[in-house]
Amino acid sequence: MIRVFLKEFNSFLNALIAYLVIGVFLTGIGLLLWVFPETSILDYGFADLDTLFSMTPYVFIFLIPAITMKSFAEEKKMGTMEVLFAKPLSDWDIVIGKFLASLALTLVALLPTLIYYFSIYRLGNPIGNIDTAGVIGSYIGLSLLAFAFCAIGILASSLTVNQIVSFILAAFLCFILYSGFESLASLAGDGALLTKQVGMLYHYDALGKGLIDSRDVIYFLSVGGVMLLGAKVALGSRHW
Amino acid sequence: MSLNIQNLTKIYGQQKAVNDISFSIGKGEIVGFLGPNGAGKSTTMKVATGFVSPTSGTVTVGGFDVVEQPMQVKRIIGYLPEHNPLYLDMFVHEYLHFIGSLYTLGSFHLKTRIREIIDLCGLGQEQNKLIGSLSKGYRQRVGIAQALIHNPDVLILDEPTSGLDPNQLVEIRKLIKEISANKTVIFSTHIMQEVQALCDRVIVINQGQLVADDLLQNLVGQKTHAPVLVIEFKENVAPEDIARLAGVDKVIAERKHLRVFSRPGADVRAEIFRFASEKNISLLSLKEEENSMEEIFKSLTATHPV
């Protein structure tokens, strides 16, 4: 598994995908956070990182499917999957290895935004006037969100040999699961809360308040787990 | 037996790709696996490597069942899939290192092994190039190198020489011959000369069914009960004169050559020589026509419609 992870991660670095992903993510988030007047913290005047934590999930919806789209689709198309399957690796080794590589790249892209936290921390009046617990909770929330999104991307990639199909499918699934249920809740009447709780936004917001509830953590981990299981089943379908 | 296939059947949807095939291959054997396109060669190989599961029947490699103990099987086989898929964006050395590391070879052992395999496959010049920039022949060598990196007991090569030029063909064949000592090798091919150059034994399948499994010499010998001679005289000789000789069945004149069909079991070569010396005519050439692999292939795969 670790070998597959290293190989995948190296291929991100070699193919310049990693630099592109990190560069685009940081540039986009940086512009939203500091430059664009509607969302700029400097114009807003309050020392918080709400913009970062509310915009990043939407950037992830496009960025993570772009990272994961090739993981299985390309290998299946090229036939290299057959080489990999003939090696002493279980299907789980391959799925988890590829999943972790995508997740690692996403987290590496997220890491430099810690600088924003320290900037706000220093800019606060008095210094340190920021909801640190909320920030920590939000970072945990973002990491869990990345976990679930990467798993969705891996599943989408394992279902098709076409990278574009994989990208669109993954982006759509991420969007529906993230904010789709939240929007549907207003139609649901009595079941509104339940509908909201199916979506990711509800759990992500809960974590963002700085309260790490095990139910929210378990929610994200199980969504990711189910998606990875789906990917494993999709790979196993060659035996049918 | 290193590779043992028992009553293997594989059905894709409605189509029977492989239908009740059984054979086994022992250590040290090189077996040519022949059949027309779509006969089920690749499917059989895919089942043997555990890539797909059989619909029914069992396949064991080195005593391990491919369905029950896939890990043990994968550790002892080397597999070159059809079309030789490779990671085109990896470097040769990097790729071999990745593949080797999957077999949990120690890092020191792995380094020496990669050096060995690069020498063996003649990749010394190319080891620091991108696989995508290599020519077809070198890519094929990389494919064979990845199949060999862990020194497998059983080698399964699906069309290892397709699309190579004649020089590369000879080199790859030589390579396969070199590495095959003490290993079980099964390879599929469409090139009949290759079978004659490489294997001891031939397995032919057609439309998913086994139609021949025999030593090459038996297979070639099978159809030559009645040898055919091609002879050439300096002077003009009437075919009827030859046809009158003892043991000759019929004679067909083809420009300067005469094709002499002898009766089963008869050897007419001495007769023809005596005929020539009695009539004082010069015999320029006399050769026995071999029943070539192509003809055998044609007859085997044509006479077994399902």
Image (tube, rainbow, N blue to C red):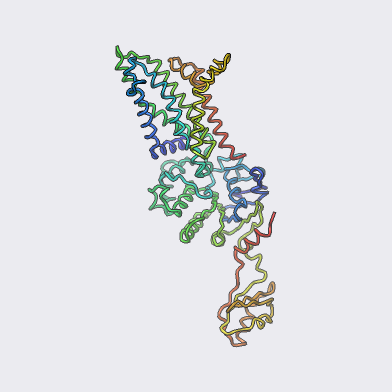
Query: Which quadrant, please, contains the C terminus of chain A?
Result: top right
Give residue A217's position: percent from left, percent from top.
49, 20
Q: Is residue B275 above or below residue A152?
A: below
Q: Quadrant of residue B211?
A: bottom right
Whether residue B172 can be seen here: yes
List x then y, in percent, for residue B58: 65, 44
Q: Nearer the viewer, residue B155 or B20?
A: B20
Vertical order, B24 against A230 (above or below): below
Counting every numbered tag in the picture gives 0
Residue toward you, A13 or B182:
A13
Q: Position of residue B212 (x, y in %)?
A: 65, 57
Residue A149 rendering spot, x and y as whole percentages: 48, 28
At x 39%, y 20%, the residue is A51
A55 or B42: which is nearer to us?
A: A55
Give the answer, above or below, for where A161 lies relative to A132.
below
Front residue of B75 and A222: A222
Image check: B268 left or right of B78? right
The answer to whether one can see residue B120 in this image is no
Determine the residue positioned at 62% across, 78% down. Answer: B253
Residue at 53% x, 24% y is A222
